[in-house]
Image (cartoon, grey):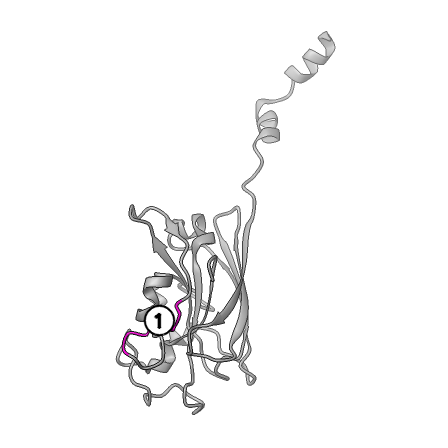
Amino acid sequence: MLVLGLVFAAIPPALAAHDTNPSEPVRSYTYRLDGVANNAPGATGTVRLTALPNGKIQVKIRAEGLAPNLPHAQHLHGILDETGTRFVPGSCPTIARDQNGDGLVDTLEGVGDYGLVRQSLTTTGDTSPSSALAVDRFPVADDSGSLSYTRTFTPTDPMVWEGLGALEVVIHGVDLNSSGGYDFEAGVSPLNPALPLEATLPALCGGPQG
């Protein structure tokens, strides 16, 4: 017994602590992306959000049925609780959110369900909410309307990493009149009158509560 006691006593404190203090586990969330209200019939997809132990997040998106050959703004949206210190699960809006009676649910009409932009899922550069309308840095759907996106980055807001499982993913951009481009036939975006409504209209949404 004396020998065993000496053996355990000789283990360095740092090594012993390592045995009882494993690294932060990877947290991963996978959701189906469905069309928002009547905005983009036939559009569908999946998303996987992963919180890595190093404070980064990885986002993988696969979608189809989107406007072909056009950029699609995409974001992590989130709703803060009354204390403003954590995110609470949001949801995807239904046609009941159509306040102006145009048969569509625009970005602002859906904010009550999915919250404000917390990260911009750009292909390069900044991912903060400031890049929410950086259309030139969002993925472009291919000829068939399919989109594939993977990016790993450090979120600009640490609460995004902590509350990743409560956030919604929203993909924007709908070619309502099948013109092959985003035009102003349906009006201007409520976010920026210099942009067409089509460019910022929510197409797909998914999260912990749909």
Residue, x 73% and y 10% (percent of image)? Answer: 3
Residue picked out by circle 1: 96
- Residue 86 lies in the magenta stretch: no
Q: In this view, does 45 lie above or below 207?
A: below
**Label 1 SS:** helix
Q: Is residue 25 left or right of residue 125?
A: right
Q: Is residue 74 above or below residue 17?
A: below
When asked about the image quadrant of residue 1, the answer is top right
Helix, strand or loop: magenta stretch: loop
Vertical arrangement, residue 142 with respect to residue 148, above or below: below
x and y percent of residue 176 in the render? 41, 86
Residue 80 vs 14, above or below: the answer is below
Q: Categorize mark 1 by other alpha carbons within 10 Å: few (<14), some (14-19), many (20+).
A: few
Residue type at numbered disc 1: Ala
Q: Is residue 94 magenta?
A: yes
**Residue 74: image location, x then y, percent:** 43, 69
* Magenta stretch in the rendered image: 93-100
Left of 4 or right of it: where is 200? left
Q: Give coordinates of residue 129: x percent, y percent.
A: 34, 63
As drawn, which residue projects farthest toward the top? 2
